[in-house]
Amino acid sequence: MKNLKGENQTIVALSSPLGVGAIGVVRLSGPSAIKIADKLFTSFKGKKPSSFEPRKMELGTFCAKNFNEQILCVVFVAPFSFTGENLVEFQCHGGIKIAEGIVDACINAGAVLAQNGEFSKRAFINGKLNLEKAEGMMNMIEAESEAEIRAGYSLLSGALGKLAISCQKELTDLLSDIEVSFDYPEEDIEYITRNKTKQKIVEIEQKINELIKTSSTGRKIKEGVNLLILGEPNVGKSSLLNALSASDKAIVTNIAGTTRDTIEETILINGVKFNIIDTAGIRKTTDIIEKIGIDKAKDKIKSADLVIVLVDASKKQSKEDEEILKLTDKTNRIVVGNKTDLIKSPVQKADLYISTKDEKSVNNLKQKIYELTLKENITNALIITNLRHLDALTRAQKALKKAIKNIDEDSLDLISIDLKTAYSCLGEITGNTTSEDIIDAIFAKFCLGK
Ligand SMILES: Nc1nc2c(ncn2[C@@H]2O[C@H](COP(=O)(O)OP(=O)(O)OP(=O)(O)O)[C@@H](O)[C@H]2O)c(=O)[nH]1
Ligand SMILES: [Mg+2]
């Protein structure tokens, strides 16, 4: 990967968010980083960054064009830095103009403004970071839930990369066995190679399949679990959305047909994101707007991970209840009886009873929702959350399946082409077989200064 462009320049960027805060961090990385810092910074002891002890903070004065600022400076000497290059970090007071002044001074002294993700890209080029680790780091930064942080951390810790590399190693062993059998073309050697190879390919394919299977949980972690609330008008759907999210996002009235469009709110349950969708109450209506809302509600059933069919526990089952139960017959659903505060014992059957006015019963429902949508243990498991990784694994699996299907008839030559394809797809995960364009596209999605 040493052929990637732009490594000889020294880059600079504000690594903390642009805005007013307690501290701003400016990073400078590349061959001239320490030389540029020498021009701009002097410690209170009169020392220049080139004579600092690496990784030790020094307090001193930074001379920007129009101001001097008292800041901290730390030097990392290649290869012992995040980027693997010489790297200098300045910690200044967190004002927009101060940070801009420091970045500008570095540019005037010979640095160029970094592109998005360029520090991480350099870390990748210099072998400090695999591609999937860099993506894990970014997932952690962008995480909106604890589950996403854990998934990002799992990538950052290299678990997926290790698995991909071990499968690649097994494929290389197989390819070399096949090569040997070409050199000794006696029939029994070929027969042994074929059988052994087939068994081994099946094993690798199974490993990949197990990983691919985790991607549906991965999608839930990344995008949130889709939770659809359906029910007849006035049953308390909007009240439930409000109770689950501890907000008053949806309008609640005792008029049937209050909600006409879908209303969405995101909540966290046990550190996982859930997208709750409140809908228009389902009934026969001549109101055009309400009708569109009802069609929209029905349409959402397909993409729901769980449907809460809300029924009124204080009333007998209605025609509408019946219709909704039929509509959700084949969907992962829970029938929840609401308004238990109005009655001594429920009039109609449900899987769970609540009152949206009773917090304890709503919390109980939350736990049930979690159990019904995330059956797997997601705490320490390796879960595929990234579509790029899923795509690479799916293509690797396809190539291996083709090899398994054809190994009894095809020449081993043809089989080895499939194995090489699988090898290359797996390499895309860590980045060892990824093209420069794709690498550029991945890092361009990172934020500036990362
Ligand atoms: N007693 C009691 N009333 C409730 C409960 N939940 C909701 N309600 C009341 O039922 C009425 C309808 O509630 P909404 O949340 O607007 O019902 P909805 O299902 O969203 O109705 P539409 O939007 O018209 O489909 C309101 O007057 C609520 O205060 C409950 O648990 N107990
Ligand atoms: Mg409503």
Image (cartoon, grey):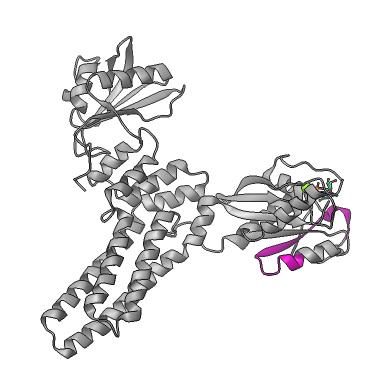
The spot of residue 317 in percent (x, y) is: 85, 65
As drawn, is 307 to the left or to the right of 126? right
For residue 144, side relative to residue 158 (left or right):
right
Judging depth in this view, the residue of 170 and 354 nearest the camera is: 170
**At 36% from the left edge and 74% from the top edge, which residue is drawn?**
401
State yes or no: residue 329 in magenta: yes
Q: Percent from the top left, x then y, of residue 414?
A: 25, 76
The x and y percentages for residue 430 are 30, 54
The residue closer to the viewer here, 69 or 202, is 202
Residue that protrudes farthest toward the top in the picture = 66
- Residue 73 vs 193, above or below: the answer is above
Residue drawn at (87%, 46%) of the image = 255
Residue at the spot 25% in from the left edge and 18% down from the top edge: 108
Figure disc tally: 0
Counting from the top left corner in percent of width and height, residue 230 is at: 74, 56
Q: Is residue 194 left or right of residue 204?
A: left
Magenta range is 325-344
Query: Is residue 436 a member of the stretch shown in magenta?
Result: no
Quadrant assignment for the C terminus = top left
| Residue situated in front as seen by the camera: 30 or 71 | 30
Residue 357 visible in this rendered orientation of the protein: no
The answer to whether one can see residue 145 in this image is yes
The quadrant in which residue 69 appears is top left
Please tell me whether residue 166 is drawn above or below residue 238 in the rendered image: below
Q: Is residue 88 left or right of residue 281?
A: left
Figure check: 343 above or below 149: below
Q: Who's the residue at 73% across and 55% down the image?
A: 295
